[in-house]
Amino acid sequence: MVLLLWLVAAEMGVAQVAPAPRKASQAQVARQFLRSVLRGDYAAAYTRLAPEVRRAVSRERFEASARPLWRNGQRRGQDIELYKLGVRLAGPSSRLFYAFTFSSESATTPPPAVLEVTFRDTTARVVLGFGLRPGPATAPVRLAPAAKRNGLRR
């Protein structure tokens, strides 16, 4: 009987082994970084910066740079949503970026502001840069010439 209880307990222990942790995706790293900044947890955000950025930028300078994002989060809310992913071409190099919007403004097209996080390349899991940018401008809608001839106007 004791042996049977021991075998059942041992089998239960094997069944409860946790799976190996997955490596966070770039989008998850970008979101975690921004959420830390929006909460004012600059220490956590600073650790997600690339080592060369941390060597070049003191924690105090980083906090001063991150504070405008925090202030915007205080006004707009701390919840964010992924808006787009892209590549910004800058001279001979390019940088992968993730742009987020404040959830409170997700229905606004285009969003008034986007939060950007840049990475060196597709394999990087440390933040190279970040910023708050004005949202993209909307282009006026123009009707095709045939629509104008048919009496349709805006």
Image (cartoon, rainbow, N blue to C red):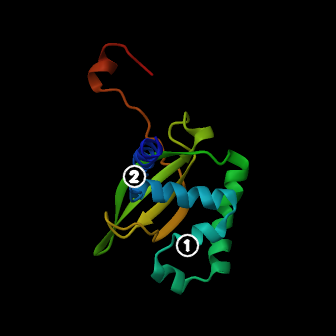
Residue at the (31%, 13%) spot, across then down: 150
Residue at the (53%, 85%) spot, across then down: 56
Secondary element under disc 2, as helix, strand or loop, is loop
Question: Can you tell which mark lies on residue 87?
Answer: none
* Viewer-nearest residue: 74 or 143: 74
Which quarter of the figure is the C terminus placed in? Answer: top left
Kindly identify which residue carries mark 1: 47
Kindly identify which residue carries mark 2: 19
* Viewer-nearest residue: 120 or 149: 120
What percent of the width, then of the height, locates residue 34? 57, 58
Quadrant of residue 38 in the image?
A: bottom right
Vertical position of residue 143 compared to residue 131: above or below:
above
What percent of the width, then of the height, locates residue 61? 64, 79
Secondary element under disc 1, as helix, strand or loop, is helix
Residue at the (44%, 36%) spot, across then down: 140
Vertical position of residue 80 compared to residue 35: above or below:
above
